[in-house]
Amino acid sequence: MKTKTKNTLVTAMCFMALLFMSCYNGKAEKANGEELSHRDSLILKQFAGIQRQIHKDVFQLYPTQNIYNFLELNTVTGQIWIVQWSIEDGKQFRYVLDDTSRISEEDKKISGRFSLYSTENMYNFVMLDHITGACWQVQWSFEEKNRLVIPIN
């Protein structure tokens, strides 16, 4: 197991232990008519954020209406690739559709921030930033000149 994954799991287990303790204390405090403390509320929110990150994949494959092609999305940055599979040798490929990161250096790196939604047009998707609500039209094509990612304002 990679060190980063181990660290994430250890951190999550620590937060689960804290959650258990804070829930136990919270129930006892609530039994006396009191609410959770500010500290306990913060711990619960931090745990919820870590839990969401653990269960989200950094990369997602989205099927197109072409059975051999998928769009691969980096759900942290919004970068997109076209992926083609084939049973014939040499017909598989992975092309950059757009390698522009949609987040700044200061932004938190959050898995699942970006998602793709198919449209009725087989070559077009809408990409959504779940944090800001920003949307982009994503058009994939075998021809580079016909590939685009443009903001929807």
Image (cartoon, grey):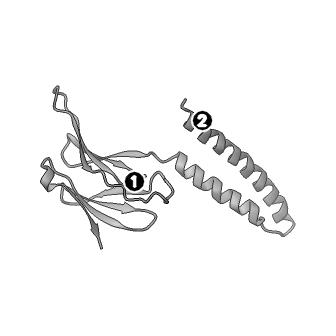
Numbered circle sitting on residue 119: none
Marks 2 and 1, Cα distance to the nearest angstrom? 23 Å
Label 2 vs 1, first from the N-terminus: 2
The answer to whether mark 2 and mark 1 are in CB contact below 8 A is no
Relative image position of residue 94 (x, y in whole percent):
24, 39
Q: What residue type is labelled 2?
A: Lys
When asked about the image quadrant of residue 66, the answer is top left
Front residue of 106 and 40? 106
- Tag 2 residue: 6
Relative height, residue 40 to residue 97 (above, below): below
When asked about the image quadrant of residue 69, the answer is top left
Left or right of 50, for residue 118 = left
Q: At 21% from the left edge and 36% from the top edge, which residue is drawn?
A: 93
Q: At 51% from the left edge and 57% from the top edge, which residue is drawn?
A: 108
Left or right of 143, for residue 44 = right
Front residue of 72 and 108? 108
The outermost residue toward the bottom is 153
**Element carrying mark 1:** loop
- Residue neighbourhood size for the residue with mark 1, other residues' Cα within 10 Å, grouped as few (<14), some (14–19), many (≥20): many
Report the quarter where the N terminus lies.
Answer: top right
Q: Which amino acid does label 1 sit on?
A: Thr
**Element carrying mark 2:** helix
- Residue neighbourhood size for the residue with mark 2, other residues' Cα within 10 Å, grouped as few (<14), some (14–19), many (≥20): few
Report the quarter where the C terminus lies.
Answer: bottom left
Front residue of 55 and 59? 59
Relative image position of residue 101 (x, y in whole percent):
36, 55
Relative image position of residue 5 (x, y in whole percent):
56, 37
Relative image position of residue 107 (x, y in whole percent):
49, 59
Q: At 16% from the left edge and 28% from the top edge, which residue is drawn?
A: 90
The outermost residue toward the top is 89
Numbered circle sitting on residue 77: 1
The outermost residue toward the right is 32
